[in-house]
Image (spheres, rainbow, N blue to C red):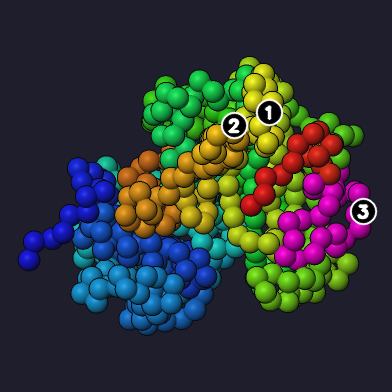
Amino acid sequence: MTATVNPLRAGIRLGPTAEPCVIVIFGATGDLTRRKLLPALYRLAQQHLIPAEFAVLGVARQQMSDHEYRAKMREALTEFGDEDTVDEAAWTSFAGGIFYIAGEFTDTEPYTSVRSRLKEIDEQRKTQGNRIFYLATAPEFFGLIANQLAQANLARPEGRAWARIIVEKPFGHDLESARALNAQFAAVFEEHQIYRIDHYLGKETVQNLLVFRFANSIFEPLWNYQYIDHVQITNAEAIGVEGRGAYYEGAGALRDMMQNHVFQLVSLIAMDPPVSLKSDDVREEKVRALKTVRPIPPDLVGEYAVRGQYGPGQVLGQTVDGYREEPGVDTQSSTETFAVLKIKFDNWRWANVPFYLRSGKRLQKRVTEIAIHFKEVPHRLFTDSDAPLEPNVLVIRIQPNEGITLRFGAKLPGQAMRIRWVNMDFRYGSSFGVKPPEAYERLLLDCMLGDSTLYARRDMVELGWEIVAPILDAWKTTAFDFPNYEAGSWGPPIAFEFVEREGRHWRKL
């Protein structure tokens, strides 16, 4: 039978296939591995984007055999993968390359076992000595595992083989701890070996920002202070802390989302064109943009940032507890679950253009978007129209319903000059007829290919912490009356007052 070709994807070449390698996952029985990593690796194998000479070696505390671990991962694929795409023959082939070692991360013995097991896998699976170490563990183990890998002579490749390490967030708790962790990794690995993952950068719409800006001549000339009034970036979640109360108590919205995910989006919007699409050139421009962020004076933090914490309410028709009633949370907690931040850039492109950033939990719905608000027309020609003129808005939707919308004015049919505001809408699903790949699929494949474009560089991580450091210090010493917003709302009233005092309004979502 002849395969049906999707006409929307005609002429599109398949991406490159990775080299043979073994991915060693520390934290192999954890939630991240079950929900994201294993399903992503299986889908890559199913699409023939990773070679047959590939293997997974899981490392975790729980005692089990290779066979038992494979069975657990098959259950995870059923629970969290796309069941309609699971092919038993493909799974059997993929599962043949899954292995497991039990041990405590603090002991030396598991790392010796990993080294010997990798040699066996190289012979059996022909993986050529190439390694990826994935730290899907609690942050307190990051530096320890890196040092243990060095002690076991696993951090530096032998001959023509390569070794890379992927580190999950959070990368540090503040500027001091981030610098210390970077120093720990630098003592063991070269910078080109270190892949600091931020899954937001693997989302299709985020990647499309480079194409949208630099492959379309109609947008880049407008991408500056002359035409743009302000930028809004919203990261809203309907869920609460989902059983992670103890972790979230030490993090909060500013650390958990703003300092990493949201700042990555900011850098892609604010950066200048790179000289090429090589990873170093793209990341250099992102860092260069963040370096021009105006420092926040410690005594003026209230003019740049506000915070909130949710109380009881209703989300999507269900009654939910307040943050202080969540398991693992202090009943008098002052941890913020909502944060708004205003940043400005001291450069020519963005002179006096504020970026308003907001991120929060237990909001009305789940949505992440970037809204570019253009300036009003310089002369109001249509003074007799029955509708007031509005500035144009370009909206880039990260999730859900990934796509791009341009809002502009159009004449309403009829004899009178009546203006209505309409949307020009692009959606990934309907435009290309396929579901975009999951973020971890792209990021894992990029690491196998040695492409670090979508990973955070050392200086990028530290810059993020530098920007929020004055806010964290001020909030640490200032009491606040929590809770101050109802679950299921769009945040505390102070968040709306924050932008309205400058003559602007949050976009309705």
User: What range is drawn magenta here?
Assistant: 473-496
Name the secondary structure under disc 1: loop
Q: Position of residue 414 (x, y in %)?
A: 53, 38
| Residue 392 appears in the rendering | no
Total numbered labels placed on residues in the image: 3
User: Mark 1 = which residue?
Assistant: 384
Q: Are marks 2 and 1 in contact (CB under 8 Å)?
A: yes
> Is 482 part of what is drawn in magenta?
yes
Q: Are marks 3 and 2 in contact (CB under 8 Å)?
A: no
Q: Label 1: few (<14), some or many (≥20) within 10 Å?
A: few
Q: Residues within 10 Å of mark 3 (few under 14, many from 20)?
A: few
Residue matched to label 3: 479
- Rendered view: 100 above or below 288: below
Which residue corresponds to the image point at 65% horizontal and 64% vertical from the top-left? 238
**Neighbour class for label 2 at 10 Å: few (<14), some, many (≥20)?**
some
Left or right, 303 with respect to 421, comes to right
Disc 3 marks which amino acid? Ala
- Name which residue lies at 8% across and 61% down: 2
Disc sitting over residue 417 in the figure:
2
Earlier residue among tags 2 and 1: 1
Q: Which residue sits at x=53%, y=48%?
A: 397
